[in-house]
């Protein structure tokens, strides 16, 4: 599992072509500080939005809703990218991503790669959540109710906002469908690595297998209805029938029968009969040509599908290769591969083997280019596949029309035969017999195709049934095996919460909440499905105490992620609720000291918090982002 890191490096807000906010952020603790109602919360809301969050039309804050666009420079697993998003109230606009820092990106639309909010079922369109998940090294994840996790859902865990209730864990959602127990559980399991045994992959495979099983079962039922009493026939029997009928047709075709006309009417009838024979032969050849083209198009479709599978595998391999490079780093030789002499190189700015200057961004840029190219090929292949499928539908329609023409011509031929003499009647009967036998062959060929498909579908249904049974057993086993992992994560978070709870004391040294002071790790219960944290069986405390408990949970999870490689939580957290619930300055300062103490000497993390009661130790350029604001943070 990839150890994901995500840091905000710079945020730029644009109105009418000019920046109205432009500040740099750093790793570690970042404090946006200032007086009440100056727009500190607005900055975190815009960060939430530009990273993929969704803000309802009635939840936009002034003056953010009067700005035009946002640029956010982020560092993902050691590589800088710039994200751009337009401000559109009541909508979910796309996100544009470009390699490199904000300073080197073009401010127009050149060079930006655009990703919308929704993925396509065909895979032709990639969502911005999928793209960011790829860059973070995450697999796309689904909850138990089959809903794909998105950046919006992930950010509900990474951003503690002011509006959500103090007893809730996750950021509130207006839409109940986006806040089910299954989704909340999926978010927590995904970010905390509770599915570290790849249970979620097994669940995704099970979902796909069950869907395919239902489709195969439905197709089988349809085939049985078409075949009716013939469903018991075998391919050997049908092939023997085709051979016998073909021999009979050849025998009839080898019989020579001359038309004999004695009157002008008979001559015209014979001529008309010959014309109709030619039409029947023409339509028969058209049918044969269409069938051949249908087979060829079907083959092209299969080739496209196989090529698509190959591209998907190459993309998966690329992501795994990038993950391996991020974990292991560049390979260094101790001896020259040509002469085997020992290599001594002390210059870190050049290649230790050939002394060429190092290009720090080469690997990341090349990776992004290849990933984009693969995405383009996947989309192009999906387009070609769609064209072939449309062409196949057109051929099938043309086949139906040609069969109709053939049937009409055969009917005319039968009518014309009534005006031909007795000797000609023999030819007509022979032709009718041949036509009947040919239609019998076509019917048998259809039966052969259906029965061939039937055998394949029965075999596939049996395979899927075995696969589903195997996956369900693996999921049950994985769930049992992951209990130790789940217990370890819960214990780690609970133990990390205790220092904050125990240090939450009044200026006279007495606790605000006696339950907090006396709490042990086994007194804390974290219930993601029901969206709550309990201490000693209690959910509710005073308003300010609830926020201490809530923020303590998030800080504890972030701290645990620094030492647990199975966490997907990207070592990133935004806090905007440290002073809610009537928090007094002394208590807020005490809480801020707890944060500093908790993350002292820790690296590779980022906390962005807002406060109007900044601790003196944090009210400086080392921790602060921008000045201490006494006026509006965003100047419009």
Image (cartoon, helix red, strand yellow):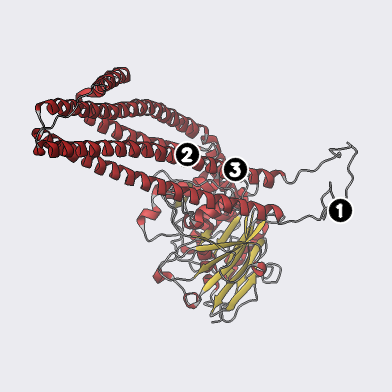
From the image, tell me which residue sits under label 1: 347
Q: Residue 557, relative to residue 220: is it above or below?
A: below
From the image, tell me which residue sits under label 2: 303
Neighbourhood count class around disc 3 (C-alpha, 10 Å): few under 14, some 14–19, many 20 upward:
many
Q: Badges 2 and 1: C-beta atoms under 8 Å apart? A: no
* Dot in front, 2 or 1: 2
Q: Find residue 566 and name its label.
A: 3
Neighbourhood count class around disc 2 (C-alpha, 10 Å): few under 14, some 14–19, many 20 upward:
few
Q: Residue 112, relative to residue 304: is it above or below?
A: below
Q: Left or right: where does residue 258 sit relative to residue 20? A: left
Determine whether the residue tagged by mark 3 lies in a helix, strand or loop. loop
Where does the C terminus fall, quadrant-wise? bottom right
Q: Nearer the viewer, residue 339 or 55?
A: 339
Tell me what residue is drawn at x 32 percent, y 17 percent.
236
Tell me what residue is drawn at x 32 percent, y 47 percent.
394
Mark 3 or mark 1, which has the lower sequence index?
1
State how far apart marks 2 and 1 are (Cα): 50 Å
Residue 399, position as x, y percentages in the image: 29, 41
Q: Badges 3 and 1: C-beta atoms under 8 Å apart? A: no
* Dot in front, 3 or 1: 1
State how far apart marks 2 and 3 are (Cα): 39 Å
Residue 522, position as x, y percentages in the image: 53, 43
- The mark total stands at 3
């Amino acid at each position: 599992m990839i150890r994901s890191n995500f840091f905000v490096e710079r945020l730029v807000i644009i109105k009418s072509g000019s920046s109205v906010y432009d500040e740099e952020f750093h790793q570690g603790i970042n404090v946006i500080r200032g007086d009440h109602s100056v727009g500190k919360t607005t900055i975190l809301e815009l960060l939430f939005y530009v990273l993929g969050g969704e803000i309802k039309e009635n939840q936009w804050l002034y003056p953010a809703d009067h700005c035009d666009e946002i640029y956010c420079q982020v560092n993902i697993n050691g590589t800088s990218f710039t994200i751009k998003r337009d401000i559109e109230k009541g909508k979910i606009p796309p996100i544009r991503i470009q390699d490199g820092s904000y300073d080197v990106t073009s401010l127009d639309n050149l060079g930006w790669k655009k990703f919308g909010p929704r993925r396509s079922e065909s895979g032709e369109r990639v969502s911005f959540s999928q793209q960011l998940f790829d860059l973070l090294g995450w697999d796309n994840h689904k909850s138990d109710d089959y809903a794909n996790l998105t950046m919006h859902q992930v950010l509900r865990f990474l951003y503690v906002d002011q509006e959500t209730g103090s007893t809730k864990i996750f950021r509130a959602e207006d839409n109940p469908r986006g806040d089910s127990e299954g989704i909340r559980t999926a978010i927590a399991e995904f970010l905390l690595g509770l599915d570290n045994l790849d249970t979620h992959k097994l669940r995704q495979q099970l979902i796909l297998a069950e869907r395919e099983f239902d489709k195969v079962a439905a197709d089988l039922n349809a085939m049985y209805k078409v075949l009716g009493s013939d469903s018991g026939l075998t391919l050997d029997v049908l092939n023997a029938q085709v051979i016998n009928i073909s021999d009979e047709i050849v025998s009839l075709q080898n019989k020579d029968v001359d038309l004999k006309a004695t009157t002008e009417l008979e001559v015209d009838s014979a001529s008309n009969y010959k014309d109709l024979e030619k039409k029947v032969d023409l339509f028969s050849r058209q049918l044969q040509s269409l069938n051949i083209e249908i087979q060829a198009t079907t083959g092209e479709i299969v080739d496209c599908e196989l090529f698509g599978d190959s591209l998907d595998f190459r993309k998966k391999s690329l992501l795994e290769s990038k993950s391996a490079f991020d974990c292991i780093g560049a390979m260094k030789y101790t001896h020259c591969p040509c002469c085997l002499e020992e290599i001594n190189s002390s210059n870190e700015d050049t290649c230790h083997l050939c002394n060429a200057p190092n290009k720090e961004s080469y690997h990341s840029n090349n990776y992004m280019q290849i990933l984009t190219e693969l995405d383009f090929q996947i989309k192009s292949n999906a387009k070609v596949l769609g064209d072939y499928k449309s062409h196949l539908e057109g051929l099938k329609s043309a086949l139906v029309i040609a069969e109709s023409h053939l049937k009409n011509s055969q009917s005319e031929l039968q009518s014309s035969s009534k005006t031909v003499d007795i000797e000609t009647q023999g030819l007509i009967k022979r032709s009718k017999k041949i036509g009947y036998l040919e239609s019998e062959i076509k019917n048998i060929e259809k039966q052969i195709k259906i029965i061939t498909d039937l055998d394949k579908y029965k075999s596939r249904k049996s395979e899927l049934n075995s696969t589903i049974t195997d996956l369900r057993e693996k999921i049950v086993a994985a769930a049992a095996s992951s209990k130790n992992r789940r217990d370890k994560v819960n214990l780690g978070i609970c133990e990390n919460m205790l220092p904050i709870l125990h240090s939450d004391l009044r200026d006279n040294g007495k606790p605000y909440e006696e339950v907090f002071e006396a709490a042990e790790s086994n007194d804390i219960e974290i219930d993601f499905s029901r969206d709550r944290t309990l201490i000693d069986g209690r959910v509710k405390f005073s308003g300010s105490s609830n926020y201490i408990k809530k923020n303590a949970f998030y800080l504890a999870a972030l701290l645990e992620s620094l030492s647990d490689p199975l966490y997907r939580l990207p070592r990133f957290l935004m806090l905007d609720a440290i002073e809610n619930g009537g928090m007094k300055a002394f208590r807020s300062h005490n809480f801020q000291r707890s944060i500093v103490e908790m993350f002292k000497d820790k690296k590779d993390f980022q906390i962005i918090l807002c406060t109007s009661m900044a601790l003196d130790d944090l009210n400086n350029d080392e921790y602060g982002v921008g000045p201490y604001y006494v006026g509006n943070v965003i100047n419009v």
